[in-house]
Amino acid sequence: MRPLILPALLAALLAPSASAQTPDAPSPDATTAAKAVQPQVVAWRRDLHQHPELGNQEVRTAKVIAEQLRKLGLQPRTGIAHTGVVAVLKGGRPGPRIAIRADMDALPVTEQTGLPFASKVTSQYRGQAVGVMHACGHDAHVAILLGVATALAAQKQELPGEVMFVFQPAEEGPPNPGETFGAKLMLDEGVFRDFKPDAVFGLHVWAGLPVGQVGVRSGPMLAAADEWSLTVNGKQTHGSRPWDGVDPITVAAQILLGTQSLIARQVNIAATPVVLTAGQFNAGVRFNIIPDEAKVVGTLRTFDAKVREDVITRFRRTAEDFAHASGATAKLEVASNAPATINDAALTTRVRPSLQRAVGADNVVEMPMVTVAEDFAQFANTVPGLYFFVGSTSAGIDPARAPINHSPQFLLDEQSLDVGTRAMLQVALDYLHGGG
């Protein structure tokens, strides 16, 4: 793919004046640079959208990223956490270190948008044939970060500090149960070992906001995600004679109802939101046989680590007590997929003016806590982190009614690519020029 912007031209657009080279001078404005790279960002996004790949299978995506980074004069490291890509840009002046992260993987969703570049890719996911779609917008995240990297590389000599570009696999989860999610695996493999940033930044396109707006909040922003599995063992018997056995289906249903009472009556949800949801209920093979076993799986979403532990303890006790009362047994297993994403308070205060500078003060809105989860939290638990949303729903469409992320009809307004590039670039420039 031929670059659309000559590096020299972009460098001229971004290069600070002589007075701007002092530590106290303002950083360059990102608007012109973001506009210059926008055609290429759109092209990258459309290409990636048409060729989505599931978690830990992002081979083509990683190749595209690495090739673009090499064109910028960078030396990308590949194969981190299976398919992750990392590159470090060293500025020509001393300054702080930052990391900017984008996730790369798509979802097992069959696209229904009707776009001319819609995905027609199919694959296997946990033993099932599935369509594959960038239904969460990770194609946009990759394109935006490549745009930011292009703009920053163009002013390398004038840039203070260093920037690590982190392209992460498997944010939506690894292909097989029990495997490690992408962010944690990258950290386990030492992505921050030799380069520990002073701050890490991430963004997410979000159908719940109109295009042009950016959403952020200090403190807890996205929930922790736990995947739980409840196994109830009873005693198989004929469906016409339930008294001869122990019905695990009824017991499991009682436990599920009990958990909803637990959330409503035992947890102070006025202080912090908690969601406990069952997504699958599997038991039996025939209409007139009460089976030995029932299995229920679901998710727990919390924003506070102590509340999380308390809810899990209460859930386990509820399950075991209901089972014991009926002569059954119950086993609850809980696996953490991601901790809560908590924006560092000092970093949020520092970065909010950069977001306002990029998109206008009126377009930076205060987000409520959102019960979706993000393993960006793993990075933000290692160094101070800041995560923000970029509105992706077109003008004239009510964001409350737009197909949300993960929908087969999720439709991103490409103006959000410019907004995201501009916002992240301004955040990076202001932080670097402002010193550590």
Image (cartoon, rainbow, N blue to C red):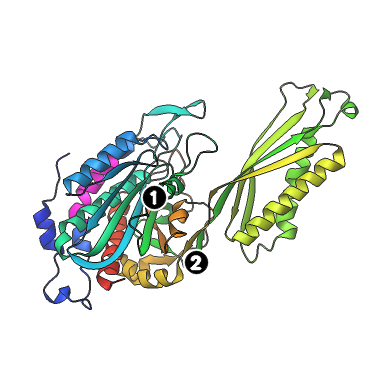
Between the C-alphas of marks 2 and 1, the distance is 26 Å
Closer to the camera in the image, 392 or 130:
130
Relative to 356, is 61 above or below? above
- 41 vs 408, left or right, is left
Q: Position of residue 114 (x, y in %)?
A: 36, 35
Which residue bears the numbered disc 1? 190
**What's under tag 1, amino acid-wise?**
Gly
SS label for mark 1: loop
First-in-chain label (2 vs 1):
1
Q: Quadrant of the C terminus?
A: bottom left
Q: Which residues are magenta?
A: 34-47
Residue 267 forms part of the magenta stretch: no
- 382 vs 417, left or right, is right
Q: Residues within 10 Å of mark 2 (few under 14, many from 20)?
A: some
Residue, far right: 243
Q: Main secondary structure of the magenta part?
A: helix
